[in-house]
Image (cartoon, helix red, strand yellow):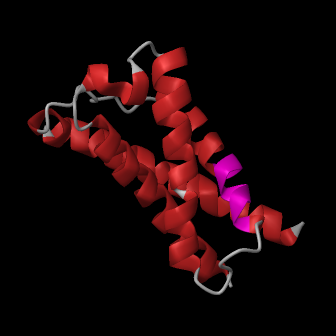
């Protein structure tokens, strides 16, 4: 139970870090400079589910693979929420096409980067908690 709590909390911290980076990239016009229309407003309604989902994804750190290589594990695990975002959320829930390409050609690259931020922030949180 203790590990699950640590990994969920670390995932929540990763979700917060991911959200702040997505928001900041939108505010600074970085996403727009890549031709990607992602510029969310920082509101509780947008932030809360992202933090909770980050925590739920954090439970993947319970998997025993690559336990001795935490940052490699974080990078590989970050691919899972990216795949869900690109091939389930964007096309089926948000009607933004496969891989969110209706938001811009570089959407997949930014999604991979933002979720990598989640993974690394989660891994740093786990490392600090030990």
User: Which stretch appears magenta?
Assistant: 55-61
Residue at 61 percent across and 53 percent down: it is 12
Q: Is residue 98 left or right of residue 47?
A: left
Quadrant for the C terminus in the image? bottom right
> Residue 19's spot in the image, x, y percent?
42, 44
Between 118 and 96, the one lying in front of the other is 96
* 17 in relation to 129, above or below: above
Residue 102 is one of the magenta-drawn residues: no
Whether residue 15 is visible, yes or no, is yes
Residue 58 is one of the magenta-drawn residues: yes
Farthest residue toward the top? 95
Quadrant for the N terminus in the image? bottom right
> Residue 37's spot in the image, x, y percent?
23, 25
Q: Residue 2's quadrant in the figure?
A: bottom right
Farthest residue toward the left? 33
Between 27 and 33, the one lying in front of the other is 33
Whether residue 45 is visible, yes or no, is no
Farthest residue toward the right? 1
Q: Is residue 99 left or right of residue 89?
A: left
Q: Residue 33's quadrant in the figure?
A: top left
> Residue 71's spot in the image, x, y percent?
51, 76
Between 68 and 54, the one lying in front of the other is 68
Residue at 48 percent across and 56 percent down: it is 118
* 2 in relation to 67, above or below: above
* 106 in relation to 4, above or below: above
> Residue 123's spot in the image, x, y percent?
55, 71
Residue at 77 percent across and 74 percent down: it is 64
* 93 in relation to 130, above or below: above
Q: Is residue 20 left or right of residue 80?
A: left
| Main secondary structure of the magenta stretch | helix
């Amino acid at each position: 139970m203790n590990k699950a709590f640590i990994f969920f909390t670390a995932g929540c911290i990763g979700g917060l870090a991911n959200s702040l980076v997505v928001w900041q990239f939108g505010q600074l016009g970085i996403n727009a400079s890549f031709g990607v229309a992602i510029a969310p407003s920082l509101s509780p309604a947008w932030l809360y589910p992202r933090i909770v989902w980050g925590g739920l994804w954090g439970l993947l750190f319970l998997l025993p693979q690559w336990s001795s290589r935490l940052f490699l594990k974080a990078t590989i695990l970050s691919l899972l929420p990216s795949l869900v975002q690109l091939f389930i959320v964007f096309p089926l829930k948000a009607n933004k096409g496969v891989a969110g390409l209706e938001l811009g050609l570089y959407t997949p690259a930014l999604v991979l980067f933002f979720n990598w931020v989640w993974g690394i922030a989660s891994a740093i949180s786990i490392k600090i908690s030990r």
